[in-house]
């Protein structure tokens, strides 16, 4: 099943986890530590209040800094756009926007490309065709699908696996960002 279909069929918790996982993988761009979004993951797991956890996460990750590049700005917008009201309608739009933003970020940072592959290739990838996407983007597509499948198959019990997928993706992106920074010196 394609990423677009999985997002269309996901329930409120799966959508929130999908958006949160995309944001979590991009935390290295925001200068945050690996625990910055933990309160939101906990909120999904125990059903506690989402809005308060969201404010804690925003506080931990700070606000936009001058000079942030396009990838960091996209990640910042994901955080800022997170809905305080965790309804299916609100998180569906956010999860879809996070999916696109995260793929754009991975496209921009992929060392195997010049960061200019088309938006059409990203949309084709979300629809299931990965032949025209770069390796980093293809891996991000697989992670997004895995998160949604874990939540669809296992409900709340799939959150741990979704977090594991996100942590692995965060490590990959942190390495890409680190290599990129070394190359600019």
Image (cartoon, grey):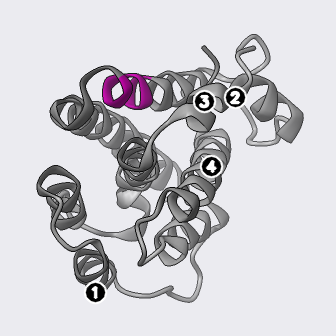
| Residue interval drawn in magenta | 146-152
Residue 32: % across, % down:
28, 68
How far apart are the alpha carbons under marks 4 and 2? 10 Å
- Residue assigned mark 2: 126
Give yes or no for residue 4 being in the magenta stretch. no
- Residue 116 in sight from this viewpoint: yes
How far apart are the alpha carbons under marks 3 and 4? 16 Å
Residue at 61 percent of width and 64 percent of height: 74
Residue at 62 percent of width and 49 percent of height: 96
With 171 as the anchor, is 178 left or right in this view? Answer: right
How far apart are the alpha carbons under marks 2 and 1? 31 Å
- Residue assigned mark 1: 59
Nearest-to-viewer mark from 1 and 3: 1
Q: Are marks 3 and 2 in contact (CB under 8 Å)?
A: no
Residue in the foreground of this view, choosing between 99 and 183: 99
Label 3 crowd (10 A; few <14 / some 14-19 / many >=20):
many
Residue in the foreground of this view, choosing between 179 and 97: 97
Residue 103: % across, % down:
62, 41
- Residue 112 in sight from this viewpoint: no
- Residue assigned mark 4: 96
Magenta: main secondary structure = helix
The kind of secondary structure element at disc 2 is: helix
Residue 46: % across, % down:
11, 56
Q: Are marks 2 and 1 in contact (CB under 8 Å)?
A: no
Q: Are marks 1 and 4 in contact (CB under 8 Å)?
A: no
Residue 137's mark?
3
With 43 as the anchor, is 97 left or right in this view? Answer: right
The kind of secondary structure element at disc 3 is: helix
């Amino acid at each position: 099943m394609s990423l677009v279909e999985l997002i269309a069929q996901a329930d409120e918790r799966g959508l929130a986890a999908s958006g949160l996982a995309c944001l979590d993988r991009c935390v290295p761009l925001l200068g945050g530590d690996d625990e910055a979004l933990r309160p939101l993951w906990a909120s999904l797991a125990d059903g506690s209040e989402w809005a308060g956890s969201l404010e804690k996460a925003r506080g931990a990750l700070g606000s936009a800094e001058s000079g942030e590049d396009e990838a960091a700005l996209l990640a910042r917008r994901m955080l800022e756009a997170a809905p305080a009201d965790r309804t299916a309608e609100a998180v569906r739009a956010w999860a879809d926007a996070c999916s696109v933003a995260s793929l754009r970020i991975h496209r921009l940072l992929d060392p195997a490309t010049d960061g200019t592959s088309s938006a059409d290739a990203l949309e084709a990838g979300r629809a299931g065709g990965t032949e025209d996407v770069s390796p980093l983007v293809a891996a991000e597509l697989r992670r997004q699908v895995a998160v949604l499948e874990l939540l669809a198959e296992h409900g709340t019990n799939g959150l741990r696996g979704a977090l594991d997928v996100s942590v692995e993706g965060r490590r990959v992106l942190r390495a890409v960002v680190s290599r990129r920074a070394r190359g600019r010196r």
